[in-house]
Image: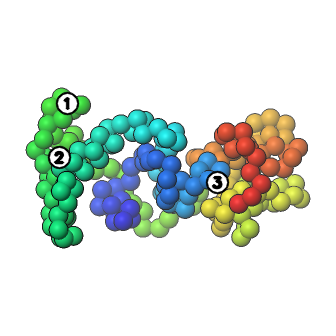
Amino acid sequence: MFSRLFHEYGLPQLIRTDNGVPFATNTLARLSRLSAWWIRLGVMPQLIEPSSPQQNGRHERMHRTLKAETTRPPAHAMRSQQVKFDRFRQEFNHERPHEALDQEVPASAYRPSPRPMPRKLPPLEYPDRFEVRYVSANGGIRWNSHWVNVSITCIGEYVGLEEIDDGIWNVYFGALRLGRLDERNMRIEDAYGRLFRHR
């Protein structure tokens, strides 16, 4: 679905989501296979705080309106329900003025992204100052003759490591910082201070 949408409308700069699957997992930086694919395309995932739907308030409000107007009562068949959704989308985007848009309709403000969907998935690139390591089939990298777990989500990909202090490295998957590697314990600590030992 995302591939079709990206081909039709271009690539966004970021996508904001909640913390549920398939957008997030319990690995470093909550990276999922879907969000890893987005990063490969140059689209940054942006997660709201867990249990904080107010951080995506406009979207939550739109969903409440959508449910109220299209599912109460629901249609008796899938095709009829889709007709209700399509009617809502037309009205919401092209007919109903929105206070947040100075009483304009969303369609008047929308422009497709100028960033086209690439034909081939581009490789991850890192600055020259980074050390680059391949994530093996067990989800880890070799570092100073030691094995360091990263994430099974990154299997077959390259991560970049940037030294920020003596023996302390920020670990990146593309532009996303996964966590911090401390060579004293050879483990990656995530943004919340947890040490990840398992996949």
Q: Which residue is mark 3?
A: 27
Question: In the rendered image, is residue 187 in sight?
Answer: yes
Instruction: Count how many numbered circles sit on residues in the image.
Output: 3
| Kind of residue at badge 1 | Glu
Q: Residues within 10 Å of mark 3 (few under 14, many from 20)?
A: some
Left or right, 98 with reference to 40: left
Which of pointers 2 and 3 lies earlier in the amino acid sequence? 3
Distance of label 2 from label 3 (alpha carbons): 37 Å
The C terminus lies in quadrant: bottom right
Q: Residues within 10 Å of mark 2 (few under 14, many from 20)?
A: some
Q: Which residue is mark 1?
A: 99
In depth, the one of 31 and 127 nearer the eye is: 31
Q: Which residue is mark 2?
A: 92
Distance of label 3 from label 1 (alpha carbons): 39 Å
Distance of label 1 from label 2 (alpha carbons): 12 Å
Which of pointers 3 and 1 lies earlier in the amino acid sequence? 3
Q: Which residue lies at the image location 43% right of the left edge and 45% below the top edge? A: 16
Residue 81: where, in percent of width, then height?
A: 19, 64
- Furthest residue in direction front, as rendered: 73
Give the quadrant of residue 5. Answer: bottom left
Disc sitting over residue 11 in the figure: none
| Kind of residue at badge 3 | Thr
Mark 3 lies on a secondary structure that is: loop
Residue 47: where, in percent of width, then height?
A: 50, 44
Colouring of the image: rainbow
Q: Which residue lies at the image location 36% right of the left edge and 59% below the top edge? A: 6
Left or right, 49 with reference to 27: left
Mark 1 lies on a secondary structure that is: helix
Question: In the rendered image, is residue 134 in sight?
Answer: no
In depth, the one of 180 and 126 nearer the eye is: 180
